[in-house]
Image: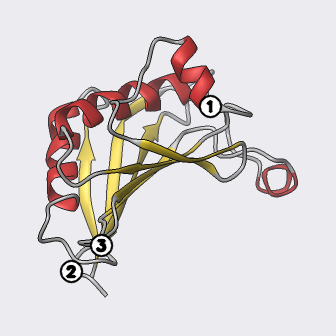
């Protein structure tokens, strides 16, 4: 079932931690995922719209980061992905900004168009990943935000 799980303040790492606990719980089934992105203020003068035509042709992601959280399987780790517009090698951008990912994650992909993908073990510190995720989203964002929105597929298959 696809569900709109809600809207939250842009500083709410407690809700992010609970989302990670929900999706990265050992009893989760494969096929469960959620997306989250900032809710942007389109009326703000600093708003940066996505250009459908140029975005399709350019090797870059969305102006506001799109995060995907995927529940792993018993023998496969959880995954966390961030599509962004920060350009090449976003991991270096985050490290240079002092935003270091928890040490138990394994970088799988760091591509300007497809984004950053990290594998995360089941027994990870979800609070540390929630803090990192919120800081990374703010660092990679190009538009003013009013909060964030989350939706996903719950219930497997």
The residue lying toward the viewer, choosing from 110 and 76, is 76
Residue 63 found in image quarter: top right
Q: Which residue is mark 2?
A: 155
Residue to which mark 1 is pinned: 90
Query: In the image, residue 115 lies at what x, y percent?
Result: 61, 47
Helix, strand or loop status at disc 2: loop
Neighbours of disc 1 within 10 Å: few (<14), some (14-19), many (20+):
many
Q: In the image, is 4 to the left or to the right of 19?
A: right
In terms of sequence position, does the residue under pointer 2 or pointer 1 come before the other? 1
In contact (CB < 8 Å): disc 2 and disc 3: yes
Could you classify mark 2 by the number of other residues whose Cα lies within 10 Å: few (under 14), some (14-19), or many (20 or more)? few
Q: Is residue 23 left or right of residue 72?
A: left
**Is residue 55 found left or right of 92 in the rendered image?**
right
106 or 98: nearer the eye? 106
User: Does any portion of residue 143 appear in the rendered image?
Assistant: no
- Asked whether residue 64 is in view, the answer is yes
Percent across and percent down for residue 66 are 50, 48
Residue 82 screen position, x and y as percent: 51, 45
Q: Give the label, 2 or 1, closer to the camera.
A: 1
Q: Which residue is disc 3 drawn over?
A: 32
Furthest residue toward bottom: 157
Q: Are the residues flagged by discs 2 and 1 in contact, CB closer than 8 Å?
A: no
Q: Quadrant of residue 148?
A: top left
């Amino acid at each position: 079932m696809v569900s709109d799980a809600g809207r939250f303040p842009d500083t709410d790492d407690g809700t992010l931690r609970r989302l990670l606990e929900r999706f990265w719980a050992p009893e989760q089934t494969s096929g469960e995922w959620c997306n989250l992105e900032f809710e942007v203020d389109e009326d703000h003068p600093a708003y940066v719209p996505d250009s459908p035509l140029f975005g399709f042709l350019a090797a870059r992601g969305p102006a506001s980061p799109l995060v995907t959280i995927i529940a792993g399987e018993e023998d496969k780790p959880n995954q966390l992905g961030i599509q962004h517009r920060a350009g090449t090698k976003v991991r270096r951008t985050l490290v240079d900004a002092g935003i270091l990912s928890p040490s138990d994650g394994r970088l799988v992909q760091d591509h300007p168009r497809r984004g950053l993908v990290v594998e995360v073990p089941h027994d990870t510190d979800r609070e540390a990943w929630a803090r990192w995720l919120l800081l990374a989203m703010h660092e990679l964002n190009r538009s003013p935000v009013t909060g964030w929105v989350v939706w996903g597929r719950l219930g497997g298959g």
